[in-house]
Image (tube, grey):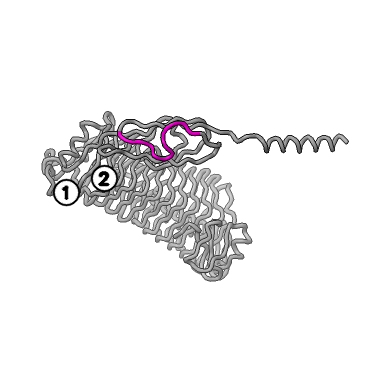
Amino acid sequence: MRAAVFLVMVALIVGMAGCLPAVRYNLTISSTEGGQVTTPGEGTFAYDEGTVVDLIAQAEEGYQFVKWTGSVSAIVDVHDATTSISMNGNYSITANFATVAEIWDWSDLDAIRNNLTGAYILMNDLDSTTAGYEELAGPTANVGKGWQAIGTQDNPFTGVFDGQGHEIRELFVNRPTEESFAGLFGYVDVGGSIKNLVVINVSVTGNIGVGGLVGMNFGTVSDCYSTGSISGYDVVGGLVGLNVGIISYCNCTGSVTGTGSAREVTGVGGLVGMNYGYITHCHSTGIAAGEGCVGGLMGFNYFGTVSDSYSSASATGNSGIGGLVGTNGLGTVSNSYATGSVTGNLSVGGLMGGNAYGNVVNSYATGSVTGNEYVGGLVGGNVYNSTVSNSYSTGSVTGTSHVGGLVGWIRDSATVSNSYSAGTVTGDVSVGGLVGLNEGTGPVSNSFWDTQISGQATSDGGTGKNTTEMQDIATFSGAGWNITAVADSSTRDPAYIWNIVNNVTYPFLSWQA
């Protein structure tokens, strides 16, 4: 009887809960002079909890959208005039607009330093034939030092610069002994934004914090592209030297060189030298070279996040050399890949040289890897509490000791799971088809290597399979992989992490184009 009464009470409570009204929150929207919010409008609006509300701000003629302010933690991108907000509380936001200053020549560009909080738009291309080049941006400018970067650490750029897709060509910087950040922009602080800009054939030589576009970025850099030759002592990148902000939809090609010794440098990268921030949908080509922490995309990813990005740049150096990232420390790399060749001495990998307390997820490498010790097709050294999961490598791997098709050396509590390698592996000491040497306590689980292609019958972790078995879905589904068969290599099923054309291809990641 008591049980029956209890069940009735539970049913009543559940029924009452279902009748409770949804939690609703208020969104109050306003704008500054120079524009308005067209979607959903301005005023106060009520929405159910969890509702995603589109936001569209439109500037009036002569003004530019700058950013959203107020309760902005739930806004996807505060610098984007077209974005959205998730309603999980009562929010009050403001669309900010500013008077636009037009940039027509090098003198206009140079004048930005007189108002580092302003909004600017580039009206046309700038090159060596544009007024002001010889005095401000060419090899003879400033007694041979060339262009002086806009924004310093003491007086950073916090405004908005919209290149409107125009090009800035033949920028020249030669300041190898100065401490300040070198590039078109020196120091972009929180709130600063640079977008839709193309920088072509730049020549930038600096000291620490050197980039073709920005030396130091705490702000947002989006939809930008750079080519040229970039050189510095440390923290050198083709686009940005040091990033603590957001870089999205950018790419870079050219030559990037770090001149510091391996013990002293912390990052040389095709796109970014050192990253503490967020990088997404970016790529790099060309050459990245230095002594330590050299990567095709970035040199050192420290606490940073890299997603949906790739590099085909070659990476060359001494220690911590990777096709995408030189060294990954406490950072995360996901849905990314590298195809460039990698050459180094210690900790050399097709995707990254060293992974310390970091995470590699849903990523791959196909480039050739050549090194001495701790050499892997994907990661050279996977140490401390690092993880490699749902990833693979297919490039050739050549080294002397601690050489593996996927990972050269595993130590401490680092792990490898649901991954594979299918490239040739050559070495002398501690050589394995998947893992060269595992001296750690973490497992190598549900992972495989191709014994025929690799030429290696053994590995310090993982399971060896012949080529036929490596192309059979049963090998991987039997190990618990999230995998499904698709009709052909151009077909994708994004509901699964892995896809395979059964008995035709190796597994591939469903996000791959």
Q: Is residue 4 visible?
A: yes
Residue type at mark 2 is Gly
In this rendering, would 175 be left or right of 190? left
As helix, strand or loop, the secondary structure at mark 1 comes to loop
Quarter occupied by the N terminus: top right
- In the rendering, at what x and y percent does residue 433 appear? 51, 61
Q: Which mark is residue 163?
A: 2
Quarter occupied by the C terminus: bottom left
In this rendering, would 106 be left or right of 427? left
Query: On the image, which quarter does residue 48 sit in?
Result: top right
- Residue sitting nearer the eye, 221 or 429: 221
In this rendering, would 474 be left or right of 233? right
Q: Residue at x 51, y 46 (%)?
A: 386
Q: Which residues are magenta?
A: 34-45
Mark 2: give few (<14), some (14-19) or many (20+) Cα within 10 Å.
many
Image vertical order of residue 217 relative to residue 513, above or below: above
Query: On the image, which quarter does residue 33 sit in?
Result: top left
As helix, strand or loop, the secondary structure at mark 2 comes to loop
Image vertical order of residue 453 relative to residue 71, above or below: below
Foreground tag (2 vs 1): 2
Mark 1: give few (<14), some (14-19) or many (20+) Cα within 10 Å.
many
In this rendering, would 139 be left or right of 60? left
Q: Earlier in the sequence, mark 2 or mark 1?
A: 1
Q: Residue at x 45, y 43 (%)?
A: 331
Q: Which residue is mark 1?
A: 127
* Residue farthest to the right, as pictured: 1
- Residue sitting nearer the eye, 275 or 73: 73
- In the rendering, at what x and y percent does residue 192 appear? 32, 36
Q: Are marks 2 and 1 in contact (CB under 8 Å)?
A: no
Image vertical order of residue 91 relative to residue 405, above or below: above
Residue type at mark 1 is Asp
